[in-house]
Amino acid sequence: MATSKLQALWNHPAGPKTIHFWAPTFKWGISIANIADSVKPPEKVSYPQQIAVTATGVIWSRYSTVITPKNWNLFSVNVVMAGTGIYQLTRKIRHDYFNEEQAVVAKE
């Protein structure tokens, strides 16, 4: 029984013999690296990089549900990419724009 399941996975249209399997695997690496970057100080976070990660996640979350066969691994990794990108962007925006206002208010 295990052999037939393994063979079914191997021969699946989104199985390990196709790019549909490997593309999300590499994107998980980007998502994990982005999560690890959350310990970096906000001034070290890059706007262009986080905008690219967020946009990729949002766009491909939508289109990963349209392709056939449905690839839920691709969908989930893109949701995580969008989430981590949004989180990093909000950290950076808060640091760059809202900390200055708080410092001015504190001086008064």
Image (cartoon, rainbow, N blue to C red):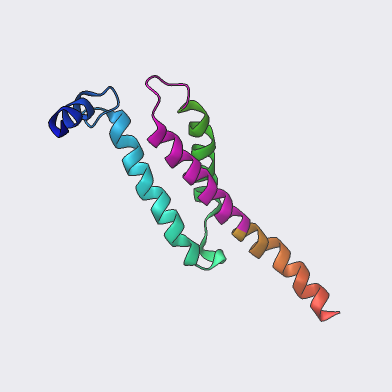
Overall secondary structure of the magenta section = helix
Closer to the camera, 106 or 27?
27
Tell me where residue 24 appears, x and y as whole percent: 35, 38
Residue occupying the point 32% across, 43% down:
26
Magenta-drawn segment: 65-90
Residue at horizontal 16 percent and vertical 34 percent from the top? 2
- Residue in front for this viewpoint, 72 or 87: 72
User: Residue 99: horizontal and vertical position, in percent?
Assistant: 70, 68
Q: Is residue 72 left or right of residue 50?
A: left
- Residue 74 point in image, percent of width and height: 40, 35
- Relative height, residue 81 to residue 20 (above, below): below
Q: Residue furthest left?
A: 3
Q: Is 70 colored magenta in this rendering?
A: yes
Which picture quadrant has residue 105? bottom right
Above or below, 39 against 108 in this view is: above
The location of residue 61, given as percent across then percent down, is 50, 33
Tally of numbered discs: 0
Q: State the residue at coordinates (45%, 57%).
A: 35
* Residue farthest along the right direction in this orientation: 108
Of the 4 image quadrants, the one containing the C terminus is bottom right
* Left or right for 77, reference 4: right
**From what the image shows, is residue 89 above or below residue 12?**
below
- Residue visible at 37% across and 21% down in the picture: 69
Quadrant for the N terminus in the image: top left
Q: Residue furthest front?
A: 1
User: Which quarter of the picture shows residue 88?
Assistant: bottom right
